[in-house]
Structure formats: C-alpha cells, structure tokens
Amino acid sequence: MNRMTYSVHLIKLFTSRDDHLFKLNEAEKLKNVWNLLFFLLGATILTYVWSAWLGLGTDAVSANMSELNRVEYEFRKAWFIIGRIVYAVLLFLFILFISSFFFWLFNNISYKKLIIIQMNVLIVMIIERLTWIPLMVYAGIDWYVSPLSFGVLASYFTSFDWVIYFFGSISIFQLFIIWYQVKCLSWLSRTKIGWIWVGVIFWHLLLWAGTSALSYFDVYIIYLIR
C-alpha cells in the first residue's frame, strides 16, 4: 500500500493554505524538507551578515572608533559579523526546533509537521528583518522604533529602554505570525481554538520579553566578549 507523500511547498502554504494544510495533515511521508532547511539556514545567515556589513547594530563596535587604527577596527567588525552568524544559526534552530517542541507538547501534531509550519514563520521573520535595512540605512530608524511596530508608540509614553524594545518586538509581521500559527495549529490539531490562542500568545510574550532582554543587554555583552 502506497504511503501518502507530501512535497513541502512553503509558498503554497501561504497562498493556498487550507488545501496544503489538508495535504500536510494527511501525509505520512514528507519530501523536500532537508532542501528547505538548508535554504532557510543560508537565507537567515545571509540576512544577518548583510545587515551587519551595512552597519546595523554596530553602535557598540563603533564606540571609541577614533582611538582604534584601521586594522583594530576591521578586526572588531569581523568578530561582530562572526557573532551575527552565530546568532543567525541560533535563531534558525530556536524558531524551527524549540518553538516546534513547545507547540508539540500541547498539541497532538507530528513534530516534523510543526517544523514545516515554523519554516513559514521563519520566512516572515526574515522578511521583517529585511525591512529593517532600508529603514536604518536611508532613514536612520532602529528596528525597535520601526513604523511597522508598536515601539514608536511606546517611546511617547516611556523612556525605559526595555519597555520600548518589548513593544518594538510587536510588529505587523509578528501579529501575522500569531494569526498564521493559530490557523495552522487549529487545522492540524484537535485542541480547542481558545487554548491554541492562549498557547501561541503566551509563547510570543516570552519571545518578545527575551528579545527585549537581549537587546537591552546587547551592548554589555559585546563589551564583555570583544
């Protein structure tokens, strides 16, 4: 008896979501997974290397630049780029595997199928980070005060950096990810929709808090490891 095979097509999981979620749900075997994993890993690393090369997030690296000679500055910048590559790999692993594990704990869905859903989440996150580049390069706007996030609004009410970073983490892209995850999980799982909303929002609150903490202590971390 032939096993039902589904060749993963990430774009169609956006454009024809219900049809492809049905195929994914019924599939006993998945194809094209490893190719997509390597593609997304490369795309994540290239995005962070490109942004680092253009100078995004290099404030701490550029501090006291006048006291450095050219070789010292380039050496510091090279270490910063290496750090961004490591960060990109960790982000890739966390979004695809740790997030999938969290959802797997509370839903009767195959872990591998959850990874497929998280692949599309990672695509949206990469697109979001690509929007940060022109905002920073041409307008000098940091990611946490992007017009596509709530960081701008938060900056009018508080000067506490952690709070601004937290609300800066909440963007149109992140809200779309929450909606997309809920839609996919409710399709693939028999868990009640209300509990799915609670689980997804709770997980994102943890992620936003973690992002805020990393951003808040980013300068100190760079000074410790440089």
Image (cartoon, helix red, strand yellow):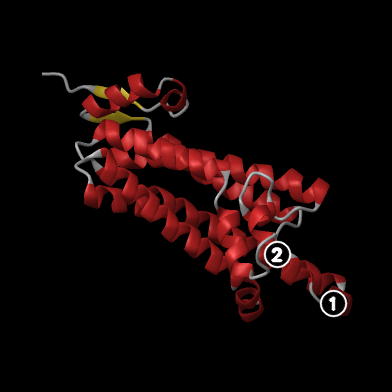
User: Which residue is the site of mark 2?
Assistant: 78
The quarter of the picture where residue 60 lies is bottom right
Give x and y (percent) for residue 17. Answer: 39, 24
Q: Which mark is residue 215?
A: none
**Which quarter of the image is occupied by the C terminus?**
bottom right
- In the rendered image of this protein, does residue 38 appear above or below residue 201? above
Query: Which SS class for mark 1?
Result: loop
Q: Earlier in the sequence, mark 2 or mark 1?
A: 1
Query: Which SS class for mark 2?
Result: helix
- In the rendered image of this protein, does residue 16 appear above or below residue 196? above
- In the rendered image of this protein, does residue 53 appear above or below residue 35? below
Kind of residue at badge 2 = Ala
User: Which residue is the site of mark 1?
Assistant: 68
Give x and y (percent) for residue 97. Answer: 36, 51
Which residue is painted at 43% across and 50% down in the image? 95
Kind of residue at badge 1 = Leu
Which residue is painted at 28% across and 35% down in the image? 186
- Is residue 41 visible from the viewing direction of this image? yes
The quarter of the picture where residue 2 lies is top left
Give x and y (percent) for residue 83. Answer: 60, 64
